[in-house]
Amino acid sequence: MESQRQVSVLPKKTSRFAILGLRVLTTILLVVPLVIIVSNVLSDRRDKKYHFYDFVPYRYMAASIVIGIAYSVFQTGVAVVRLRREDHGNILLDFYGDKVISTLLATGSVAGFVMTAQLQKQWGEAVSDYYHKYFKRSYAADGLVFLAFVCTFLLSVLSSYALPKKF
């Protein structure tokens, strides 16, 4: 009986460059919101300062970003090595790792969006340009984490195409 070969969506070399590009883009899309979250400080009328670590959802989002950066940097290095050696490597690590990280980034992004909306609703009556600036930065960080989730989701789809070839 003849074994059926699955046709790849992209040529082998092109898909490896696409994976490398998506991993680099994911890293960039995670570093920028981390900088935004850490530098985004809100002061109220009594000069009390609120940092990201004062709110649990922002802490969760920051933790998911840091874990995402670590995984993305590791996988970028692995992708470069694979590109030079023309090796497939550990496909199961890619497959399951991309699934876990994409889920983590999605939940981190949603936590950030929900917290920002709650703060905006809570402090909505006292809206000033200073508050708007804080909320715009928070929404920008949340959106960038969501874009990083989209990249890791695409990477998980690409890594799932390699599974039938290997197993």
Image (tube, grey):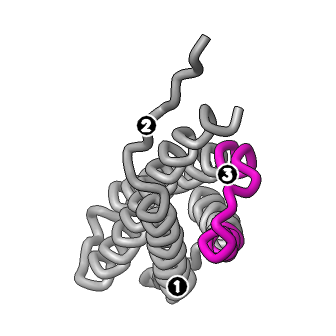
Give the SS element for disc 2. Answer: loop
Q: Earlier in the sequence, mark 1 or mark 2?
A: 2
Residue marked by disc 3 = 94
Seen from the viewer's position, the closer of residues 79 and 44 is 79
10 Å crowding of disc 1: few (<14), some (14-19), many (20+): few
**Residue 95, x across and y down, in percent:** 65, 44
- Residue 164 quadrant: top right
Q: Earlier in the sequence, mark 3 or mark 2?
A: 2
Residue marked by disc 2 = 7
Residue 140 visible in this rendered orientation of the protein? yes
- Residue 162 quadrant: top right
Q: Quadrant of the C terminus?
A: top right
Mark 3 and mark 1: Cα distance apart in space: 27 Å
Seen from the viewer's position, the closer of residues 150 and 4 is 4
| Amino acid at dot 3 | Asp
Q: Nearer the viewer, mark 3 or mark 1?
A: 3
10 Å crowding of disc 2: few (<14), some (14-19), many (20+): few
Q: Nearer the viewer, mark 1 or mark 2?
A: 2
Residue marked by disc 1 = 35
**Residue 165, x across and y down, in percent:** 61, 37
Residue 116 falls within the magenta-colored stretch: no
What's drawn in magenta, residue-wise?
74-97
Mark 1 and mark 2: Cα distance apart in space: 41 Å
Q: Quadrant of the N terminus?
A: top right
